[in-house]
Amino acid sequence: MGWTINCCDAACNQASWAENIVDLIENHRTAEGWIRCAHCGGEGYIEKSFDLQEPGETWEPYLKGIIPLGNPEDVYQPFVFLVSYEHHEAPNDIWFSYYKDTRPIGGRLKLGYGPGGPPVLGVTQVLTMLRTLVQLGCVAEETIVNAVRA
């Protein structure tokens, strides 16, 4: 499955393409994790749309960033998308996902949400995600500290 990356910069306004989730994560993000335009290097986003079970309802997220949470040498790679609901807004939701890449051993690349549910994360991976969210400015450190103390 390919990914169309749109540029947020009106002066560039070009789209680029990531061949699959591995290409997207490895080649189309800034060092911090934000999705970037391949043409100008500026902020990018991926627009998605999913039909919901409720008739006529859709979920239309804008994917703004990706936080990988797995060991790079593992086949199973959990990660989260940073999601907003307007392409120009900062992310305010987190979409848990994973991919499994067995192509190096004769298999295939699979993107999913877990067998029967979301990916399984270790406590250290959750802490890494929280640390990265603070570094990216998606949440204030004090908010996390206050939540833990509550």
Image: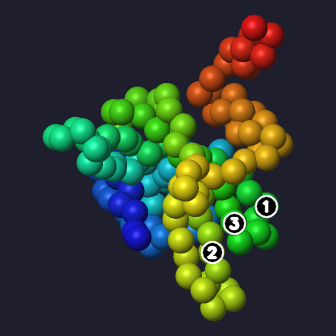
Q: CA distance from mark 2 to mark 3?
A: 7 Å
Badge 3 element: strand
Of labels 1 and 3, earlier in sequence is 1
124 shown above or below 76:
above
Residue 71 is tagged as 1
Find residue 23 and report its image quarter: bottom right
Disc with the residue nearer the chain's start (2 vs 3): 3
- Coordinates of residue 93 in the picture (x, y in percent): 50, 32
For label 2, the SS is strand
In the image shown, does 11 or 6 lie closer to the viewer? 6
Viewer-side label of 1, 3: 3
Q: Nearer the viewer, residue 142 or 12?
A: 142
Which residue is drawn at the image coordinates 79% and 46% (left, top)? 122
Q: Mark 1–mark 3 contact, CB under 8 Å?
A: no
Amino acid tagged 3: Tyr
Residue that mark 3 sits on: 76
Question: Along the polypeptide, which appears first: circle 1 or circle 2?
Answer: 1
Q: Which amino acid is tagged 2?
A: Asp
Quadrant of the image containing the C terminus: top right
Task: Name the image quarter holding residue 11.
Answer: top left
Q: Are marks 2 and 3 in contact (CB under 8 Å)?
A: no
Q: Which residue is drawn at the image coordinates 69% and 51% (left, top)?
A: 120
Q: CA distance from mark 1 to mark 2?
A: 13 Å
Name the residue carrying label 2: 101
Q: Residue 78, position in %: x, y?
A: 66, 55
Q: With respect to residue 121, does 85 lie above or below?
A: above
Q: Where the N terminus falls, by quadrant?
A: bottom left
Three-letter amino acid code at disc 1? Asn
Q: Residues within 10 Å of mark 1 (few under 14, many from 20)?
A: few
Q: Taking 19 as reference, is 60 above or below it?
A: above
In three-dimensional space, the C-alpha distance between marks 1 and 3, rounded to whole angstroms, equals: 8 Å
Residue visible at 67% across and 61% down? 77
